[in-house]
Image: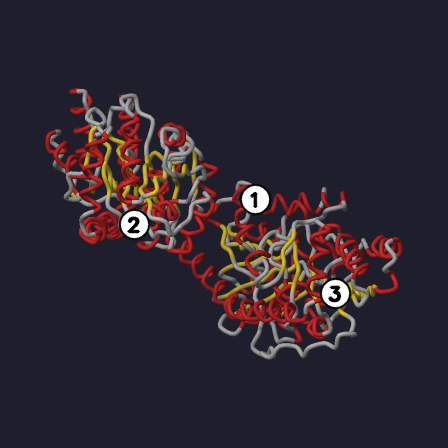
Amino acid sequence: MRIMLFAAGGDIGGGKTHILSLARELAEENTLRLISFRRGVLSAEAREMGIDTVDVDSDLGTVKAFQLALSQADAFVPDVIHCHGAKANMLGILIKRIKGIPVMTTVHSDPRLDYLGMPLKQYTYGAINAYALRRMDYFVAVADRMHELLIERGFDPQSIFTIYNGLDFSLAKTESRPAKDPGETIRVGIAARLTPIKDIATVIRAFALAYEKEPRLRLSIAGTGEDGSALKKLTHQLGVDGVTVFEGWVEDIKTYFSGIDINVLASLSETFPYSLLEGAYQHCPAIATNVGGIPSLIDHEVTGYLFEPGDVETFAGHILDLARNENLRKTLAENLFEKSSREFSLEKMKRDQQRIYETILRRKAAGTRNGAVLCGAYGRGNAGDEAILRAILTQLRRIDPDMPFHVMSRNPAETRLKEKVGSYYIFNVPAFIGSLRKARLFVNGGGSLIQDVTSSRSLYFYLFTLWAARRFGCRIVMYGCGIGPISGVRNRRIAGRVLNATADIITLRDSVSLDLLREMGVSRPEIILAADPAVNLEHAGPEGVRNAFAKEGIPANIPKIGFCLRAWETFTRPGEVAKAAEYAWNAYGLTPVFLPIEMPKDMPVGETVSRMLSVPHYVCRQNHPVEDLIGMLGSMELVLGMRLHSLIFATAGGAPVVGISYDVKVDSFIKDIGSTACVSLQGLRAEVLCRHIDDVMTQEREHLGEGVRRRLQEMERANGLAAAKLLKEERVCS
């Protein structure tokens, strides 16, 4: 692979370390050239490291820099250009426009904060960089939080990759530092640019508070920057100038941290700072702000201390704790060294970056028509629908990891952020048509979209999406869906015609839907009885379940019976459910837990029933991820559910279920799992519910829950196989 790196050339500190270390590693297996748009330390060190480097005198200006970039692109013919810094980004997009070479950039920090406190640069370089970023093909975010920030700012989630910075730990000493004598000084150190974003004033203030109580403390500040004079005045004002050393710029950072006892960082914003890894290399414990990617490295009170930006008192307390406790310093330092060397190595960073380049080239080779459009009831806050979306995306990514997705959603911003996909408002027809023109596959479902209970308009809308997908040449799979109810005779006739004319494969989650399709005369598509996509979602493990229950104040180890209720016009006997909940407690010691599936709609119903109880109980009020919900429900002795997906989640987790039916889809699910434990709302009586509770509690859980779970999971695989079949056929045809 031929890789060209564009660097602004004035990079120092972590930025310089990142560029040079990555370039050296990538050059071992690829043909790489570094273009530095300023002659200086970066280009000089790159040549010393044996990196193929071309630079230009910064005094020659932007035009000369552009001419250099263009001539080098012609001479080197790169497969990809990777930019670092605002000037490099601007030149990168110019070359992209002229040469059509894929261009990406690494986002080392929040672009809006790069020139904090420098209004002139903010409105010149900052504005140019903002323009360039919007025209980049791909981005590398140096932390998950930066990845999320870019999505929130409107960048395409599918063009963003995350790579955490890495350091070469191969030559690091594995033994811990020798203990200090009781009278020795304790050096607190920070290596950072002296700029507003690093908030070194908070370091000085916290140090001053700690020094009042621990006179052995000394402060070392390594770095240069525009805040230098103001910071020196602050040390004088606080009376710590005599125990503070401004080291200036430090070239040998490893030697610097070998003499530091406590590594600190007070940044207002960060991605993933190298200074923490460089301190970890020297077995130095760390205290840092809880921002950006820092919590990925610093586990509070395990691998270091975290504090909120500007919280001087908490920061000072952490400094005192470490200054006064040699064993604590050693424990945190060794934990930090072990985690850093294992998870944030230079080798891992190189492998991750290499995979990104390979992905970019595969996407380029795949052409413009290489995506899937997903249509469903997404973005409404219903955990069941969100589980379906997550399950479909998971399966399609296994089939084709490079496939881009566009999801029709009621809340596109939330969908983009949660699922890292392209998304637009479900009724945005121009966006819908535009995405169909680029897609290979149209996925309808799952869930019950083809029905007229909600309204005939809803039915016609989803039929229109199927027609449009066929019109624009997509292969169509209706994925793990439910069909019906469709009560109108005309609606049935129209739906049957459209399904016969559009769908290639229909996979169903229940047998009632299969019967309805036959009644409607749908025979042209291949029809497969499968299961709901959500049954094969991974769920939270024991620790995750404990944490989820802890957020609700619920002990994880007590036996529980779950109630997942919803507001419905014919649900007029909440007292019957309350009686059954009391019976479960009195007869079997099961604590009732009311767990909403759609927030906040379902919570008031659970609260209504809970107010009728005289036994211990809990009402969940948090919005839990799907994986946690499956784990929570699966850990219960029994789940009584109105929401279909409460029954599916519980079954996926291995728990037995009793259905409270408000819709035929609930009856169908209970029937398809081989059970008769279902009560209609019209026939809702406490004695019937109690009888089902008795049946469950007197049988083996393996028979009721685990066996059903395994059977459904095997059936569900048919959904993914159907999608894979269509994608394979589409490739052959094209």
Q: Name the residue under label 3.
A: 188
**10 Å crowding of disc 3: few (<14), some (14-19), many (20+):** many
- Three-letter amino acid code of the residue under disc 1: Arg
Label 1 vs 2, first from the N-terminus = 1
Disc 2/disc 3 C-alpha distance (Å) = 49 Å
Q: Where is residue 433 in the image (x, y as percent from the top left)?
A: 37, 34
**10 Å crowding of disc 2: few (<14), some (14-19), many (20+):** many
Q: What element does badge 3 sit on?
A: strand
Q: Which mark is residue 339?
A: none
Q: Is residue 230 left or right of residue 456?
A: right
Disc 1/disc 2 C-alpha distance (Å) = 43 Å
Q: Which mark is residue 653?
A: 2
**Above or below, comparing residue 588 to residue 296 in the picture:** above
Disc 3/disc 1 C-alpha distance (Å) = 41 Å
- Three-letter amino acid code of the residue under disc 2: Gly
Viewer-closest of 27 and 258: 258
Q: How many labels does the image show?
A: 3
**10 Å crowding of disc 1: few (<14), some (14-19), many (20+):** few
Viewer-closest of 634 and 66: 634
Q: Where is residue 439 in the image (x, y as percent from the top left)?
A: 34, 43
**Which residue corresponds to the image point at 17% horizontal and 29% vertical from the top-left?**
496
Q: Name the residue under label 1.
A: 134
Q: In this view, does 409 lie to the left or right of 443?
A: right
Q: Which of marks 3 and 1 is in front?
A: 3
